[in-house]
Image (tube, rainbow, N blue to C red):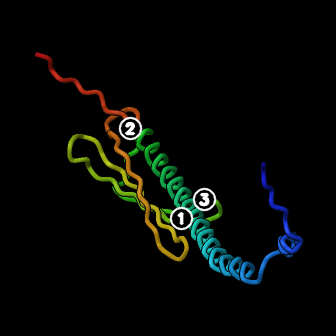
């Protein structure tokens, strides 16, 4: 024999009444804590994404300047040991400086382009370097050298 308890009439009424005041207050308290933390996190992510986009633009400027300077080397013109100028990327003007220095290990020369920018109220300087052989026909390649074989 199986026994199935019958629900009492007052149990059905209690289940359909809704949330108690304590449950509503607990839910509001949790929302008051979670929402500001989530909004602050979204703000941090947004600022980091903006800074990342600015740094990508700065590196594009540095790469463009470096390639232009290496094109001067390829045309056979002598390249100065330093230079500076401004480049515009995305409507923003960036100041750049270029330095060349002999590479200590062989006949290569190191060219470094530094680009300055201000992002989120802070000054940043990013640099990009490359090695080239001033005696080579094509920049970025080693000059042909002959070594006697025994």
- Helix, strand or loop for disc 3: strand
Mark 2 vs 1, N-terminal side: 1
Give the x, y percent position of residue 78: 37, 47
* Nearer the observer, 74 or 87: 87
Q: Is residue 128 above or below residue 32?
A: above
Q: Are marks 2 and 1 in contact (CB under 8 Å)?
A: no
Q: Alpha carbon of mark 2 to alpha carbon of mark 1: how far?
A: 25 Å
* Tag of residue 68: none
Identified at 53% across, 63% down, the residue is 86
Q: Secondary structure at mark 2?
A: loop
| Neighbours of disc 1 within 10 Å: few (<14), some (14-19), many (20+) | some
> Which residue is at 10% across, 16% downward?
150
Query: Which residue is more in the foreground, 50 or 92?
Result: 50
Query: Residue 56 location, x and y as percent?
Result: 54, 56
Quarter of image, res 72: top left
- Give the residue drawn at x 36%, y 51%: 111
The quadrant holding residue 126 is bottom left
Secondary element under disc 1, as helix, strand or loop, is: strand
In the image, farthest residue toward the top: 150
| Label 2 sits on residue | 140
Q: Are marks 1 and 3 in contact (CB under 8 Å)?
A: yes
Residue 48 versus residue 139: which sits nearer the camera? 48
Q: Is residue 79 above or below residue 147?
A: below
Judge the density around disc 2: few (<14), some (14-19), many (≥20) Cα neighbours within 10 Å: some
Q: What residue is rendered at 41% in x and 43% in y? A: 73
Viewer-side residue, 140 vs 18: 18
Relative side of 118 to 126, left or right: right
The earlier-in-sequence mark between 2 and 3 is 3
Residue to which mark 1 is pinned: 94
Q: Position of residue 31 (x, y in %)?
A: 68, 76
Q: Which mark is residue 89?
A: 3
């Amino acid at each position: 024999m199986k026994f199935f308890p019958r629900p009492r009439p007052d149990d059905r009424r209690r289940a359909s009444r809704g949330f108690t005041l304590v449950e509503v207050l607990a839910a509001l308290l949790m929302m008051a804590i979670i929402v500001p933390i989530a909004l602050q996190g979204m703000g941090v992510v947004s600022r980091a994404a903006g800074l990342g986009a600015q740094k990508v633009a700065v590196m594009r400027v540095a790469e463009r300047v470096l390639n232009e300077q290496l094109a001067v080397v390829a045309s056979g013109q002598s390249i100065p040991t330093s230079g500076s100028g401004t480049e515009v990327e995305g409507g923003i003007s960036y100041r750049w400086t270029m330095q060349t220095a002999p590479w200590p290990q062989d006949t290569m020369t190191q060219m470094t382009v530094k680009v300055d920018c201000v992002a989120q109220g802070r000054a940043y300087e990013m640099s990009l370097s490359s090695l080239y052989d001033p005696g080579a026909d094509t920049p970025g390649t080693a000059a042909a050298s002959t070594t006697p074989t025994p």
